[in-house]
Image (tube, rainbow, N blue to C red):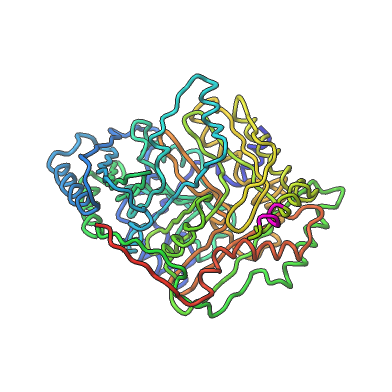
Amino acid sequence: MASLQLSSHFLGTNTTKHNSISISHNYSQTPFTRLFSRKFMSCSMSMNGCEGDFKTPLGTIETRTMAAVLSPTAATERLISAVSELKSQPPPFSSGVVRIQVPIDQQIGAIDWLQSQNEIHLRCFFSRRSDVGRPDLLLDLASDNGNGRGSSDRELVSVAGIGSAVFFRDLDPFSHDDWRSIRRFLSSSSPLIRAYGGMRFDPNGKISVEWEPFGAFYFAVPQVEFNEFGGSSMLAATLAWDDELSWTLEDAIEALEETMLQVSSVVMRLRRESLGVSVLSKNHVPTKGAYYPAVEKALEIIKQKSSSLSKVVLARNSRIITDTDIDPIAWLAQLQSEGHDAYQFCLQPPGAPAFIGNTPERLFQRNQLGVCSEALAATRPRSASTARDMEIERDLLTSPKDDLEFSIVRENIREKLNSICDKVVVKPQKTVRKLARVQHLYSQLAGRLRREDDEFDILAALHPTPAVCGLPAEEARLLIKEIESFDRGMYAGPIGFFGGKESEFAVGIRSALVEKGLGALIYAGTGIVAGSNPTSEWNELDLKISQFTKSIEYEATTTTLQTIN
């Protein structure tokens, strides 16, 4: 269990909580934070589930499915009618969660629906990556144990949500009690009631002003949600209430009705070759002149016989200022067009910047007792030439430096899974995973949890991985804190969802924080091990952010709009 203790700096164990809604009392009172506090309070018409009694079960957790319709407009009308009926025939419970869902007989992009909604509410988006061509180790484990596994949830392509039926946020690190507070609102019998969100890379670090709205963690069960399936869609509305938190069913219905009135049922398909903005300036933190000495310092420590450090990941943020505001959802849609082999995500608390990403890396996926993770490390560019691309692949597979970096990640994850699982499978031991612009060394690992309540231990064990922090984790974290002069926030943190039947988290890399009037901060990192070269590492940082910068460094060329009836 050593790995669990090692990660205790990243997830909390204390149970003392304070009222995290009153954020104006928790931050230094700059004009920005005073303005933000008022804006946040005015938009957060919901309850913070972290303040409830996680030991007391809710009165009801249920899903009501209406008859299928042909369009988002018809689905919206049916939901409004169903919420009105719920108001006249309320469930006889002092606490609960009710999801009302309307299937739509056509596949509509969840990101297109989200782009059609206004920005005054919380906005979230999570799109699963395509795992076509890779073995399903969770299915193998289920077969070995004689257990089948339903496929209906696996067909869910992406989810977009606005508003929060219930949210979970605090300034203290995410604790086991916080996890139990979230689980209180979930049930395996209602698998699509999920809490979407993320956590900071280092929740104990000082929170910079741009990351204040997110707290140490932020999760929400969306009020209104659009689900995209393979071949169909679904519009859903969720109410959550708890009289003990002074948030009654009547309050929840009133807040939902207000949100439903603002839902746009006119969905526009919008794909751009460019975002229509021009870059006015781009600045890196650290600068190139500061980055090289930082890498040399890390290498000196790694080489010391007295040091246990074998790897540290040093990150960079790149501030870009543009002539007009960047639409984060349009930017994410542009990334999605080339990111089928990656997760896309967006998390934007009310009135806050949007954290978006196009990450190839899974932290873990849990389906009942099965849990799957992966090792992803070492980077090379792709080539338009098939022969040259294969040559680069062979170089990556045979490089001693890259094999060392990758082996550190894979063996560390194997050790951590062994601490919480009865059985761990690794398949393959090492291969190359090719993305649109880069290729990495890759391996899958899967195990079987001893009990479902061990889900929190998955997070405690796996975050942070050596791929985004280093090894040993605590030594790497302390060096990162000493060297890096900016707040990573949720960059490289867990991003995903908790569900009653299934949970899935990606690692929040290849990501950016987008804020109106302030451009964007684009994040990237590289692993420093014995044999690393500062010039190569700097070039790797540029390569990793190229998927973001390519779409904003040129004037707009083509915009296509198509109304979905």
Let me know if residue 284 appears in the view. yes
Q: Is residue 83 left or right of residue 46?
A: left
| In magenta segment, residue 388 | yes
Highlighted magenta segment, given as a residue range: 386-390
Where does residue 399 sit, x and y in percent of width and height? 78, 50
Task: Name the quadrant containing residue 118.
Answer: bottom left
In the rendered image, which quarter is residue 22 located in? Answer: bottom left
Q: Residue at x 37, y 60 (%)?
A: 350
Residue 208 belongs to the span the image colors magenta: no
Q: The N terminus appears in which quarter of the rendering?
A: top right
Instruction: Please identify the dominant SS of the magenta region.
Output: helix
Percent across and percent down for residue 202 are 59, 52
- Residue shown at 38% from the left, 31% from the top: 188
Task: Say whether residue 489 is left or right of residue 237.
Answer: right
Judged left or right of residue 53, residue 564 is: left
User: Extreme top residue here?
Assistant: 146
Q: How many marks?
A: 0
Residue sitting at x 17%, y 44%: 82
Q: Which residue is drawn at the image coordinates 17% and 39% (left, top)?
A: 90
Residue nearest the viewer, comparing 418 with 395: 395
Please determine whether, in this image, residue 268 is positioned above or below residue 76: below
- Rendered position, 367 above or below 540: above
Up the image or down, 87 lies above or below 41; here it is above
Query: Foreground: 250 or 358?
Result: 358
Quadrant (top left/top right/bottom left/bottom right) for the C terminus: bottom left
Taking the image as shown, residue 180 lies to the left or right of residue 298, namely left
Between 146 and 272, which is closer to the camera in this rendering? 272
Q: Position of residue 195 (x, y in %)?
A: 40, 44
